[in-house]
């Protein structure tokens, strides 16, 4: 990587590969900014993050993630709190971070926006969330941390080999609904204890996860705050009825749902694995802090 290059992390399997053929055009559009474009190579997520760190340390003028929220999550680990431009080409199934931060939906239009931002020397400062687990390791995330029933479903789906695609998550939901039970949560928000028994906890820097489900609908990644949503014990029927309301964010009007705004969250419950940006963070407890303007978004 040469200083001043544009480094690109691309996931060709993102969005079930439907944007695979667009990558050459994306690279060409980015190159029109007058910088050399280097495509990072990696065979797994660990290698991808290391490649991003090397690119930023090598003086890349911009780090661009081509893929979905998982690819964005990997690239954020290198770009957060660093003097490097960050670009997103939405090519996944969800693209929640891109949608929430005003990135154009169409991949080539997003590439043109990044090129123009570099040429004009402009950037948008966007907040990120920073989480620390029991191992003391920090992880950045851009969209939402799931730490309730949704995280349990994610963990179940990741253990399943069949079926592939979205149906795996649908089956995981059905299987976990049969085991649905409330958990005892230790929850501290800006130093104030709000422990409760419940089914759902989500911490948002952005409003949505899972491809547009507005789990924390008031969340704004430019306000210097995190949004937290919790839900009291819910029955299987209630969970099924609330799910359609997530698309519009109207579930927060339910009296069993509580919302908070804060700068720091400490969260624990036995047997829960936290997921952020759809990626596995690790077991609770977790401490999450907002970092205002941590990323220099090019759009």
Image (cartoon, rainbow, N blue to C red):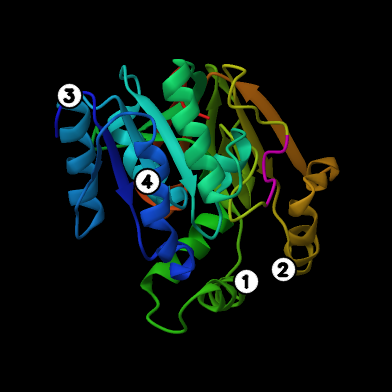
The residue pinned by badge 3 equals 3
Q: Secondary structure at mark 2?
A: helix
For discs 1 and 3, the disc positioned in front in the rendered view:
3
* Of residues 270 and 109, the one drawn nearer to the viewer in this rendering: 109
Q: Which mark is residue 236?
A: 2
User: Would you call the spot at circle 4 few (<14 residues within 10 Å), some (14-19), or many (20 or more)?
Assistant: some
In this figure, which residue is indicated by the disc labeled 1?
Answer: 177
Q: Are marks 2 and 1 in contact (CB under 8 Å)?
A: yes
Q: Is 215 a magenta residue?
A: yes
Residue 195, image x, y percentages:
59, 34
**Alpha-carbon distance for marks 3 and 4?**
19 Å
Q: Which residue is mark 4?
A: 28
Structural crowding at the residue carrying mark 3, measured as other residues with C-alpha within 10 Å and reported as few (<14), some (14–19) or many (≥20) = some
Circle nearer the viewer, 1 or 4: 4
| Residue 221 position in % (x across, y down) | 58, 26
Which image quadrant is residue 245 in?
bottom right
């Amino acid at each position: 990587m040469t200083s001043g290059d544009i480094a690109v992390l691309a996931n060709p399997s993102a969005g079930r590969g439907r944007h695979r053929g667009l990558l050459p055009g994306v690279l060409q559009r980015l190159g029109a900014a007058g910088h050399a474009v280097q495509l990072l190579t990696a065979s797994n997520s660990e290698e991808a993050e290391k490649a991003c760190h090397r690119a930023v340390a090598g003086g890349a003028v911009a780090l661009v993630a081509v893929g979905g929220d998982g690819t964005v999550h990997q690239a954020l680990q290198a770009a957060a709190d660093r003097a490097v431009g960050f670009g997103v080409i939405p090519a996944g199934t969800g693209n929640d971070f891109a949608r929430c931060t005003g990135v154009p939906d169409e991949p080539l239009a997003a590439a043109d926006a990044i090129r123009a931002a570099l040429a004009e020397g402009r950037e948008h400062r966007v907040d990120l969330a920073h989480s620390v687990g029991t191992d003391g390791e920090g992880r950045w995330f851009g969209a939402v941390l799931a730490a309730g029933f949704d995280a349990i479903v994610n963990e179940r789906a990741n253990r399943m080999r069949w079926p592939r695609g979205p149906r795996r998550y649908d089956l995981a939901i059905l299987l976990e609904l049969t085991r649905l039970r409330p958990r005892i949560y230790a929850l501290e928000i800006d130093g104030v204890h709000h422990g409760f028994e419940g089914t759902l906890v989500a911490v948002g820097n952005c409003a949505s996860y899972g491809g547009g489900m507005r789990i924390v609908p008031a969340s704004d990644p430019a306000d210097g705050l995190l949004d937290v949503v919790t839900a009291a014990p819910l029955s299987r029927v209630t969970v099924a009825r609330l799910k359609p309301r997530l698309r519009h964010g109207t579930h927060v009007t339910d009296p069993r749902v509580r919302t908070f705004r804060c700068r720091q969250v400490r969260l624990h419950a036995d047997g829960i694995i936290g997921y952020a940006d759809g990626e596995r963070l690790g077991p609770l407890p977790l401490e999450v802090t907002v970092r205002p303007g941590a990323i220099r978004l090019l759009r």
